[in-house]
Image: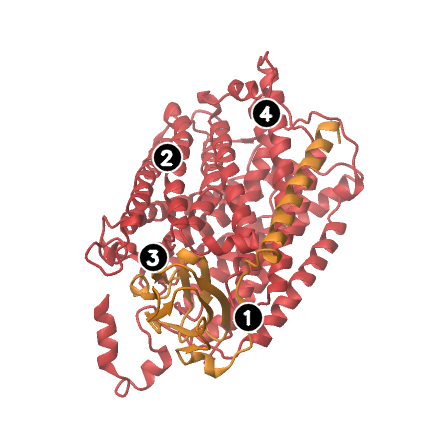
Chain colours: A orange, B red
Amino acid sequence: MDKYEIRIMVLTGITLAIFMVAILRSSFTYATGIPECIPYDESFTQPRIEKLDDKLYQIFALAQMWSFEPSEIRLPVGAEVDIYLTSKDVVHGLNIHDVSLNMMAVPGGINKETVTFKKPGVYKIVCHEYCGSGHQHMMGEIIVNYPNN
Amino acid sequence: MMKINLRKSEKRLSLLLLSVPLILLTLGIYHGLMQTLYRSGMISQTSFAALEYYQGLTLHGVINALVLTIFFAVAFGHICMSYYTGIKMHMTTAWISAVMMVVGTIMTIATILAGESSVLYTFYAPMKAHPLFYVGNALLIAGSWVAFFGWVGIYRKWRREHKGERTPLAVVATMVNFTMWFVCSIPVAYSTLVLLLPWSMGITATVNIPLTRTLFWFFGHALVYFFLLPVYLMYYVMLPTLAGGKLYSDNAGKLVFFLFLVFSIPVGTHHQFAEPAITQGVKYFQSLLTYGVALPSFITAFTIAASLEYAAWKRGDKRKNWFSWMAKLPYFEKDRYLFSYLICGLIIFIFGGITGIINASYSLNSLVHNTAFLPGHFHMTVAGPTFLGIIGMSLYLLERISGKEVRLKRITNAIPYLWTIGMFIFSTGLMVGGLRGEPRRTNMGISYMDPDSPLYRPDWVWTTGTTVIGGVILFAAAGLFFIVLLDLLFAKKTKESYISFPTYRTYHQEKVIPFLNSFKPWLVIMFLLILVAYVPAIFNVMKYTGKEAPPYAPQNPIPLELHKQDVGEVDEGETLNLNQDE
């Protein structure tokens, strides 16, 4: 190896180290995680919303060909929501772009993610995994009202 | 320049392997353009000209990403192994492999065209394809193994006869690529033949979905390197000489290929960050390993840039500053069109590589996972360097095997530049759209892009419009390529038929380093890393999956078996309603 090659290796090492530190920092300091996996239980396949207190909610979401259940969810501003997601039939996706919520609904597996809705508005849910001929029609929304609903 | 003459049987084999995917490519490219039209809402219907959107999307993926790449890798591998070792092709294995691949491809494509396998090229269960779709895919992949088994014999023979000598870089590259390919495709062959095939035939009732997905991605990420490495071989072994220079370092090249062998496979779960049944720890670990794969690409960026800079100096670059060499390369020399195909691929790949690092970055992936950003990224890898390298080299080889010469030289030389412009416009549209939440693999024309639909998203209008502009340019470039190819077919034979590649030279006189001249240490590291990365992943999907799934047809929310058994009992009204929604 000549000196240029050694320099480029060092530079590469530094670049990759910066990326890795950025990942570690984003997950530990800012707690921007990815979905957790939860042991399977039949109760997760019953779509429902549970209110734990003023701000804390649990949504048990079920994706199916070709809709999300519950399809319309109303929450107060600032609601902190645990979303549990699974699929009734084939593989689906659940993407709420405005809060970077991005999960897959896979039959037989339970996915969990926590998200806070800080601003009022209508958050559209998009299915982003091909799930059959009606894929593009899957619809769902979360309506975050001010101050309560 | 060294020349080898191919025997008649070798010529026939090479022509078959090179032309089958190019013929199918017309279909694959056609539906590439059609998708941009569907997605932008210019076509607002479920099918067009007897081809349904998802059926066409399946064709686009299977032909462009599997058939074209596997056929080319095998054809190019046969020629490289025999050219660089001087040992004739092993015809028995070569023909068995070719027949398996052709038969497999016909099966797969036929079931897609029949509308029985609209499951996309990732064939995610529990969406069920026709059993022959799985058999066909397995035959295509296993066929490529058989070719590789023949090369193992050639490699060992060469090593016996040349003890202590430096193995040619092209041979190392080909063997690395197919070793990795063989290892990574065993689980997916198991998944298709043992899990999915009996399930699709109704012999087994259900299948473990997270398991099939994990086995698929064990293969799926290595697959993209399998696309790329034949083109990397061209970058290392041919591009420096084409540019008028020498390769900066042979040992660096070998290190790069061996690093790909080690790191390509144990990173697959970075495609599954958003999925259940795999714990965060496993995903985290593989995300970090993914940076290991970035390492050989960084080394390549340096080595190839240094080689090209040296070439520019030889060509009279006087200023010798950081950027002056870029202006001195043979971009528009009509007798050296292969250079323009390779350099355009490299330029596109800079952006393909960087966006890949974004996708692999654990939490950052949440922003882009399964959005249009993803196809934006991978079109700059597989439809950038891979595609341009494949069509450029196919043309180069067809010229030499047939003894003919391309007549439309200026057009041939312009195609990759046109393609590059189209690709940048197209990918920008997709990636910006992805950052705004556009889903990938979706017929958006009948919902999100339809102003009358409750799902209408006006903020995606100009991004999808941009992909149409890019798509049209790409389609035009591909069209020109087919014109050049047809013209070559009708040209007269002017030369004798032989294979020759640009002479391989290196800038540094390097010593033979034993661990860069042997597969053994790298194979050991490879298996250890795979065990560490994948044993916990497989353990996870077995433990966390609570229920297996029966097969479904893409058109119907009721499981297939249930649908067949109690046609009378199933709520027909509900089924009909759902179908009317389309």
Please name which of the two marks, 1 or 2, marks the residue nearer to the observer. 1
Taking the view exactly as shown, the residue that stands out farthest to the front is A147
Residue B311: mark in rendering: none
Where B316 sits versus B78, above or below? above
Residue B149 visible from this viewpoint? no
Residue nearer the viewer, B276 or B245: B276
Disc 2 vs disc 4: which is toward the camera? 4
Q: Secondary structure at mark 4?
A: helix
Nearer mark to the viewer, of 4 and 3: 3
Q: Earlier in the sequence, mark 2 or mark 4?
A: 4
Q: CA distance from mark 2 to mark 4?
A: 26 Å
Q: Is residue B507 above or below residue B206?
A: above
The structure residue drawn at horizontal position 55% and vertical position 52%, both measured from the top left corner, is: B360
For mark 2, give the secondary structure: helix
Q: Position of residue B404 (x, y in %)?
A: 43, 29
**Which residue is painted at 59% across and 13% down in the image?**
B319
| x then y, percent, for residue B380 | 46, 42
- Residue A99 lies in what quarter of the image? bottom left
What residue is pinned by disc 2?
B481
Tag of residue A37: 1
- Real-space Cα distance between discs 4 and 1? 48 Å
Q: Can you identify the residue that label 4 sits on?
A: B308
Q: Chain of mark 3?
A: B
Amino acid type at mark 3: Thr
Q: Work out whether B539 lies above or below B441.
A: below
Left or right: B365 in relation to B442:
right
